[in-house]
Amino acid sequence: MSPSANSNSTSQTVAVLAGGVGAARFLRGLLRVRRQADVTAVVNVGDDFVLHGLSISPDLDTVTYTLAEQVNAETGWGRRGETWHVRTELGRLGGQDWFALGDLDVALHLFRTQRRNEGASLSQITRELAGRFGLELTLLPVSDDPIRTRITPAAPAEAAEIDFQEYFVARRHGIAIRSVRFAGIEAARPAPGVAEALTSADAVVLAPSNPFVSIGPVVDVPGIREILARRRERVVAVSPIVGGQSVKGPAADMMHYLGHEPSVVGIARLYASCAATLVIDHADAELAPAVARAGMSPVVTDTIMADVDRAATLATATLHAVDADIRDTDTTRPAANSTGTGT
Ligand code: FO1
């Protein structure tokens, strides 16, 4: 824990809406400036699927491995120091090896699958796994109910609808898409603790994750968007788009295909109803007035998390942004196109 954790006046308890790699890196930085006990991560489960009969929750695992310093730093997912005997043998046998499951990772999926078969909920299993990886933050799947992200390709020759991992991994998110939906979400309830954390946190952060397939299946769980909208001044988003490009993954391409401007302004239009502040990179500073016109207070800072120190600096700027926004709301709110520095 950094010495700054207790020595500044910014929001103490923090809830983070999280996808995979970008969110995990943000959380790692956040835990340099906040105590684990003060942080709750509410994680996307739309990417979850069953392969070889195993229950796989990629975003929960990416967050767990990253915060436990066990992640493969190159890919951002999977285990550090992984071996691949199972996958190699599976390929030799002619089995499905398109989704890379390392040996250590397989053990975790076996554990989750066994516990599911015993009747444990995903949030209970996630708590057990977080404890076994030595984590003390509250790590929650957004829901214990099944939510599955499904993608409709744009080309009529393609299948009518494909599973998220088929789009993301098997097709390397390289195809044009027509739409995204979250099967099961209408009936899904927030997992125990999710609504409470989002209601009580001093600050709620939408991590720099894909707005459609990472943050979307979290905020679309019935009740979540309403909580955020009611506490909008306490909600801050970090843009996953820098200079019109995704920092990682297909966010910018998806914005284009789904009819949104692939820029921080497009992000502001998507998030304005449930977050008051948008943290954008210096590369997009000239778009700050347009972000303000789209309904979000822009804060310009360095958002590229090249290492954990920079992620910690971004986390600090993000928390300061919420508090600045609250102060502005309480007293004299600056003109809509003013640009904070985030420090
Ligand atoms: N992503 C890939 O691009 N290729 C893979 O083979 C792959 C395997 C994998 C195994 C376990 C796991 O927890 C994650 C894995 N990921 C892989 C990442 C993951 O599918 C995506 O990053 C997320 O679903 C998007 O957030």
Image (cartoon, helix red, strand yellow):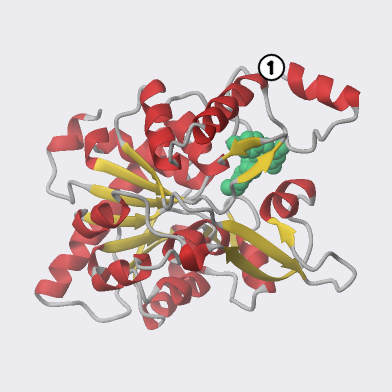
Residue farthest to the front? 118
User: What residue do we see at 55% from left, 62% from top?
Assistant: 184
Secondary structure beneath label 1? loop
**Which one is in front, 297 or 69?**
69
Q: Residue at x 80, y 33 (%)?
A: 97
Relative image position of residue 95 (x, y in whole percent): 85, 31
Q: Mark 1 Cα within 10 Å, few/some/many (few <14, many 20+)?
A: some
Q: Quadrant of residue 288?
A: bottom left
Q: Does any portion of residue 188 appear in the rendered image?
A: yes
Q: Nearer the viewer, residue 132 or 173?
A: 132
Q: Quadrant of ligand 1?
A: top right
Point out the image quarter for the N terminus. Answer: top left
Residue 40 appears at what percent x and percent y? 30, 44
Q: Does residue 35 appear in this view?
A: no
Residue 79 rendering spot, x and y as whole percentages: 58, 25
Residue at 82% x, 35% y: name it: 96
With respect to residue 92, does 56 lie above or below?
below
Q: Residue furthest left?
A: 331
Asked whether, in this view, residue 296 is left or right of residue 66, the answer is: left
**As rendered, which of 234 and 227 lies closer to the eye?**
227
Which residue was labeled with disc 1?
83
The image quadrant of residue 275 is: bottom left
